[in-house]
Image: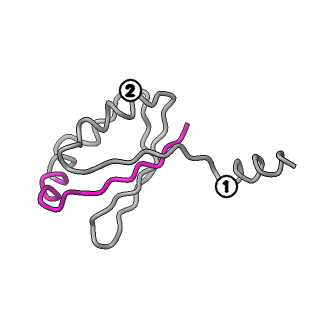
Amino acid sequence: MKYMIIERFYSSKLKDLYLKLEQEGRLLPNGVTFINSFIDEKVQICFQIIESDSISLIHQWIEHWTEYADFEIFPVISSAEAKDKVLKQR
């Protein structure tokens, strides 16, 4: 399952977040795969695509970063999967 993770950074912790990321990496547990991420131009919000078969592993990963941001987790499917899902409902 793929997840869209939305992180809203704490501005007072932003530099610390990037230093930790640089020093320790993403700290993903086994079973969690980083796909890609995008940051808004104000460097306030991060949009990440993460893949895992276990939502508990996603929560485990987030625990490393909770002092730096608030997190929202959304299970997502591709546009092609959404199209198939909608067209099968006819």
Q: Residues within 10 Å of mark 1 (few under 14, many from 20)?
A: few
Q: Nearest the camera: 22 or 38?
A: 38
Q: Which residues are magenta?
A: 1-18
**Residue marked by disc 2:** 30
How far across and down, in percent of the image, does residue 30 sit?
38, 26
Side (left or right) of 71 relative to 14: right
Q: Residue at x 47, y 27 (%)?
A: 54
Residue 17 sits inside the magenta stretch: yes
Q: Nearest the camera: 35 or 5?
A: 5
Classify mark 1: helix, strand or loop.
Answer: helix
Side (left or right) of 66 relative to 81: left
| Type of amino acid under label 1 | Ser
Q: Which mark is residue 2?
A: none
| Type of amino acid under label 2 | Asn
Instruction: Kindly report the distance in space between the C-alpha atoms of the residues bearing marks 2 and 1.
Output: 27 Å
Residue 38 sits inside the magenta stretch: no
